[in-house]
Structure formats: C-alpha cells, structure tokens
Amino acid sequence: MKKLKSVGSAILNALSGSLVPLIPVLIGAAMFKTLLAVFGPDVLGWIHADSDLYILLSFVADAGFYFLPIYAGYTSATYFKVSGLLGMFLGAILIHPTFAALDQSLVVFGLTVPSLAYSGTILPILLSCWIMSYVYKGVERVIPKVLQDVFVPFLTILVMLPITLCLVAPLGTWLGQFICDFVLSLGSLGGIGTILSMALIGAFWQYIVMSGMHWIFITTIITILATGEVDALIFPACTASSFSIGGMCLGAFLALRGTEDKAKAMSCVIAQMIGGVTEPGLYGVGFQYKKPLAGMMAGGFCGALYAGITGVVCTNLVPVASLLVFLSFTGASAMNLVNEIIAAAIAFVVAAAVTFVLMKSGEK
C-alpha cells in the first residue's frame, strides 16, 4: 500500500511540476481567445471573421495550444532533470508538419510508427521525457566526457525515437483520449447524470486539489479545448467551488469575534476574489475551524448544481480562481457567462450562509 501511495504521489508531483510552469502560456493564449470571443462576430461584432486582425489574433491564440508538446517538453524535461531543449526537440518532432501530414503509418527497420496527431497533447511528451531522463543518464555514463557534448544529445534522441514514436506517444495519446472521452461522456449524459456529476465535483473539488489529482483534470480540460471541444463538466463546477472558498471565509468573518481572526478571514476572501488564491482560505479558515468546510462543500455543490442545470460550458481556459476566471465562459452565448456568474454567486452565498449558521450555532 505504501508503495502504491508513493507511486501515486510521484505521478501527481510530476504532473504538477510539469504543468504549473505552463500556466503563463495558457493564460496568455486564453486572453487572446477571450479578445476574439468578446470583440469577434459572436458577441460585439467589432472584429469581423474575415479581417486580418481576426486572423492574426486567431493563430496567436491557437499557438498557445497547438505547440503544447514543445512547451511541455521543456517543462517536463526540466522537472526530470534533463536538458529542457532536448525536451523541446522531442516535442517538436511529434508535431513536425511532415509527420503531422502523414495519412498512413511509417515502417522503418520493421518498426511501425503510427500516424497520429500530437498537437495540443500533453501526456505523450510527459511520458517521453520521463523515459528520456533514464536514457540520457545511461548514455551519459558510457560516453567519455570529451565526447559527451556531441554524442549524448544525439544518441539520446536516437534511442528515444522508436520508444517515443512507436510506443510511448501512441500510448499517451490513447490514454489521454480515453480520459477525455470518459469526461465528455459524463458531460453528455444529459439530465440528472451530468447535473449530479457536476454537483459532486463542485462539492469535493478542494479535496481533489489537496490530493494533487486536479492536475489530471486540468490536463484533460486542456486536451479537450485544444481539440475544439468545450468542457461541459469539470471547469464550470470547479469554478463554483473556488468561489465557495470566498463565501466560506466571508461567513467565518461574520461569525468570528476576534479582530485578528476577522482580519485573517477577510484577507482570505480578498485572496480568492482578487488574487485567485484559495489555499489561505482552505487551510487558514476551513481546516482551522473545521465547521466552515461543510459550508464550502454546500456552496460548491449548489453552485455546480445550478451550472449543471443551466448547461454552462467552458470554452476557453483561464486557469485562475479570481474574478478573471469568468473569461473562460465568454466564447459561447451571453447566457452561458451569466449563468456561470450566477453559479459562482450561489456558491459564494450558500457557503457564507451555512458557515455563518454553523459557527454561530455551536454545532459540531
């Protein structure tokens, strides 16, 4: 059991260490997509779809997601203590135009290289860089120091080519596709299935974050959006959960008596709403006083429940927990954005009310 826990912890740490550095790129690309969504033909209509400005903003926004294997190649290789540039090189191989344009598998020295699209994917390059860390160190041990600068990078990539293209990358793609299909199937269940799934994610999302499992969900969202789909399950629910933290802290602020405690609770409200940071509220208020955790879960459940009932979808990932997160819901109808704002407001108010009542009543 301990070994399983350590393996699971190592996987989650690797996901976190590889994905967190990508956030500036994802936010930057998301902001360009937001400009298109708000000022483009679907909302304000200030930028026409056939204009040069629209074309420019469109490919700039897409570049943030299309070249993910290169960005993730750098961050994951760096995490596994290998040259980040080699990771980028491996990621670039996966999305090279010649390889991407193939309509049939290659057969080289009897090895079959499946023709698959890797643009916008993350798992294939993460798995490849993990294995490359062992290959690199092994090659480095057997090559004399005087020749290492030339032959270690060359032999590492040479060894990684069949491993990556024939086995690891296809496996990562199929695994990622399976997870995406599973999430999309939950989101497309319709009726009570989708609504209940979202409500449960909203209620338990902060515990998922604590375990580190949220990176698996974030990876899935990125992959879904990179393929042109929308996330109708995870992000609308976890957004509501984020605002339940702010509501929980406000409820605690209203219930607490000590000036210092009240100041801390209010600072946690501001940290979530403006700074997009939920950890101070979760650990400094929720786990310190215990009762607010019930308010947080109730708020997340109710907010996500409303998002599920109204069919809110995430069209554009802005991975923050502040008010800026609503930009993630601007690419669909106007009511999509309005309903997510309402969902977050419900989560905030319910969490505040339940927390206040529980802390004032003295119930355990």
Image (cartoon, rainbow, N blue to C red):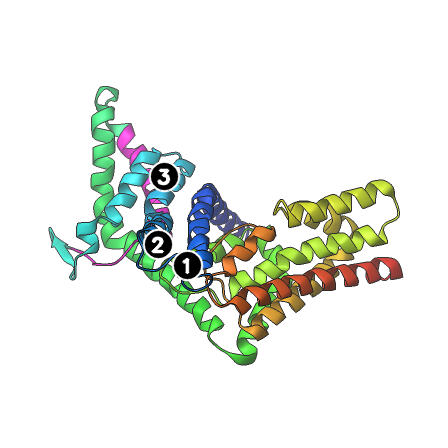
Q: Secondary structure at mark 1?
A: loop
Say the numbered circle drawn on residue 74: 3
Question: Closer to the N terminus: mark 1 or mark 3?
Answer: 1
Q: CA distance from mark 1 to mark 3?
A: 33 Å
Density class for disc 3 (Cα within 10 Å; few <14, some 14-19, many ≥20) is many
Q: Is residue 133 magenta?
A: yes
Q: Residue at x 76, y 56 (%)?
A: 292
Q: Is residue 198 magenta?
A: no
**Tally of numbered tags:** 3
Q: Position of residue 7 (x, y in %)?
A: 48, 49
Q: Position of residue 70 (x, y in %)?
A: 32, 44
> Residue 116's image quarter?
bottom left
Question: Which residue corresponds to mark 1?
Answer: 40
Quarter of the image that includes the N terminus: bottom right
Is residue 363 shown left or right of residue 236?
Answer: right
Mark 1 or 3, closer to the camera = 1
Amino acid type at circle 3 is Tyr
Say the numbered circle drawn on residue 54: 2
Q: Residue furthest left?
A: 109
Amino acid type at circle 2 is Tyr
Q: Which residues are magenta?
A: 112-140
Q: Secondary structure at mark 2?
A: helix
Density class for disc 2 (Cα within 10 Å; few <14, some 14-19, many ≥20) is some
Q: Residue furthest top?
A: 146
Is residue 77 shown left or right of residue 353?
Answer: left
Mark 2 or 3, closer to the camera = 2
Question: Closer to the N terminus: mark 2 or mark 3?
Answer: 2
